[in-house]
Amino acid sequence: MSRKKRQQKSPRLLAAQNWLEGIVLNAAIWLFRLIPVDVASAFMGFCWRKLAPLNARHKRAHRHLQRIFPELGDEEREKIVLGMWENLGRVAAETFHIDRLLKQTYRFEADADEVTEEVLNGGKACLFVSMHSANWELCVQPAVTRGLDITGVYQALRNPEADKALRALRKDLYRGGLLSKSHQTARKILSTLKNGGVVAMMGDLRESRGIQVPFFGQLAYANPVPASLARSCDVPIVLGRVIRKNGVQFRVEGRAITVPRTDDRQADIESATAQIHAVFEGWIREYPEQWMWIHKKWAPPGKNAAEKHARKASVSRLDNP
């Protein structure tokens, strides 16, 4: 039975389940915070490396790698996928220490271009767009340590108790507020950017209602929202990635791009979105084991005319909220 049906048929049971899951999660947070982050990260990385291959997503990651890198042998693909699982296990443990990690500046080194430096120094509004590389949660660390109040966008968990617990851990990352995806989110983001603020969101997830751009030599679903927002507010996009150097040590990189502004709005958005994915592709090729190969980026696109119209309408609403 789906969660939606359970809520319709037994709201009290669902509320009790949410409450119980919230208690379990808070207990896990308390327990992992008792363990030094280096130990917790290494332990979870080891566990995920050993146990995650039993999950069906392990085969999906292999299929994606075989599709993108057909020249790789089975052992080479397995090495990348196991490295991915270890990294994700580390991220899971580090999430419980995220507020502490932000303050441990000795764990980080930053590499920013000129425009990104201007943003970090508080001189320019921008849209931070990152990808699921290493511990992507820490991509805003250089900005936070320089005192920027960043507004974040995220996908809320179905369980409100669990969502509340994880939001509390991220409050120091997003002092400008943490917005869950909703119909009102676009308005709030536009207001923040037009008032000189900084907004952060992920840019490498599959968006079936989005557009298609080249990605590793094939068309992939992509989210046009970052490009649309940046174009509407005339602000740069700063692409960010985190590289796991060794254990809980990171390098954070920032590279700015400018969204074109011509008479063809849709072409501008598609061009910028393709540019974002071209940069992401180059970064992923450098450290393939640190990206999430379980994403369904290359699923066959829908061909229904109504779907295409809905995609264009969803982008258009961002310029006319």
Image (spheres, helix red, strand yellow):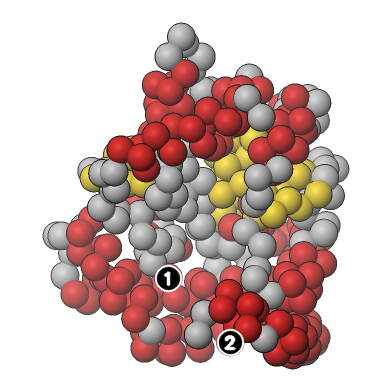
The residue drawn where x is 29% and y is 56% is 299
The answer to which of 321 and 151 lies nearer the viewer is: 321
Q: Position of residue 220 (x, y in %)?
A: 32, 46
The answer to which of 1 and 201 lies nearer the viewer is: 1
The residue drawn where x is 16% and y is 70% is 73
Asked whether residue 275 is in view, the answer is no
Asked whether the residues under the numbered discs 2 and 1 touch, taking CB atoms below 8 Å apart as contact, a structural biologist would say no
- The numbered disc on residue 84 is 1
- Under circle 1, the secondary element is helix
- Under circle 2, the secondary element is helix
Q: Nearer the viewer, mark 2 or mark 1?
A: 1
Quarter occupied by residue 111: top right
The answer to which of 218 and 17 lies nearer the viewer is: 17
Residue linked to disc 2: 43
Query: Between marks 2 and 1, how big is the CA–CA gap?
Result: 15 Å
The residue drawn where x is 44% and y is 38% is 310
Tell me the amino acid under the disc marked 1: Met
Q: Position of residue 238 (x, y in %)?
A: 59, 35
Q: Earlier in the sequence, mark 2 or mark 1?
A: 2
